[in-house]
Amino acid sequence: MNYENILSQRVQSLQPSGIRKFFDLLEDMNGAISLGVGEPDFVTPWHIRDAGIYSLEKGFTKYTSNAGLAALRREIAAYLERRFDLRYDYKHQLIVTVGGSEAIDMAIRALVNPGDEVIIPVPSFVCYPPLVTMACGVPVLAETRVEDGFKLTPELLKKHLTPKTKLIVLPYPCNPTGGVMEKADYDALAEVLRDTGVMLLSDEIYAELTYGQHHYSPANHPELKERTILVNGFSKSHAMTGWRMGYVCGPEPIITQMIKLHQFGIMSAPTTSQYAAIEAMRNGDKDIEMMKEEYDGRRRYLVEGLNRVGLPCHEPKGAFYVFPDIRPTGLTSDEFCERLLKEQKVAVIPGTAFGPGGEGFVRACYCVSMADLGEALTRIGWFLQDLKG
């Protein structure tokens, strides 16, 4: 069988995630410290796990409604209003999804026609361009700069905006850079978009993890809310990655179309996870604050340490990643990561895995203990000394 002729050409054109390569190298390496995994090292808080267990004990194992349990949608709406001053009608403007990833995929497919352009600030998470490609759209990569805090500036937006632009992805707080957007930034973008019909897809999975400031969503902006599709979830804020729980909010006409994709592709999100998520929304605010405080301490420690050993590192304002500049070493991002792993058994991810603009940087995640961060910094220091000879 000639599978190349049988398989979808569009699927075959997609490149595998650049992140997975380093996870594969780690499998057979003893004593390595991984700063590569973008996953909380906290276990899901007990009261949330207990709610999931209780739902199983009570036999709550049937399908839910396509959009999710009404009780969960009400709690999500209350949470968004309480935490971010965002108001959505849980009946008509909100769908519970299988993680934020499904929500992103549905939003793109619900909006994009063949040939439509989607502006994606990069470096950013790896899923956006492939999902646009699979929807027959055209990814337009806008390279952000460290000098701008890796923000989508109005000048950068104007450079890439065309009559074919249908959607702009806003991955803030940003994986891998830790960049954030503030109200003044959205004021400037609103000015550029004022006379257009361009929509915004705001991936806010790290919204609870901002430092020294409160997260501001484009849905908070009076000129941008009607064009914003908001994606969020429980993985990062409540340490619920394996529960696969997310949600999407937006204008009712768009959500009405998205629910059809959800019905035919998924049916409904996992029932046990939904009952756990209800508890997370009702009683999880203290968990968020505890984890955020711990991440903040690690963030400051790692930024200071990287700058001290000789890797310039801008201060990330959100998420749980640092994005140090490795250009002073003279190595490419891939060379740096491969040699650091082989010579000192520390795993970080090359910036090139996150798109154009990532060359010269690496991503390190601080979802590990302070002891591991300290040891990793020591090993990175040794590695840099060895490079100097």
Image (tube, rainbow, N blue to C red):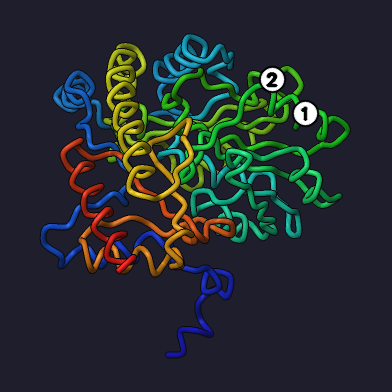
Q: Secondary structure at mark 1?
A: helix
125 over 55 or under it: above or below: below
Q: In the rendered image, which quarter is residue 382 located in?
A: bottom left
Q: In the rendered image, which quarter is residue 55 located in?
A: top left
Can the viewer see residue 359?
Answer: yes
Which numbered disc flags the more N-terminal residue, 1 or 2?
A: 1
Measured from the top left, where is residue 341 in percent x and y?
26, 63
Q: Which mark is residue 221?
A: 2
Nearest the eye: 380 or 265: 380
Q: Quadrant of the C terminus?
A: bottom left
Q: In the rendered image, which quarter is residue 16 located in?
A: bottom left
Q: CA distance from mark 1 to mark 2?
A: 9 Å
Q: Residue at x 27, y 65 (%)?
A: 386
Identify which amino acid the numbered label 1 is placed on. Ala
Look at mark 1 in the image and give the residue it sits on.
Answer: 190
Identify which amino acid the numbered label 2 is placed on. His
Nearest the eye: 39 or 14: 39
Q: Residue at x 21, y 62 (%)?
A: 344
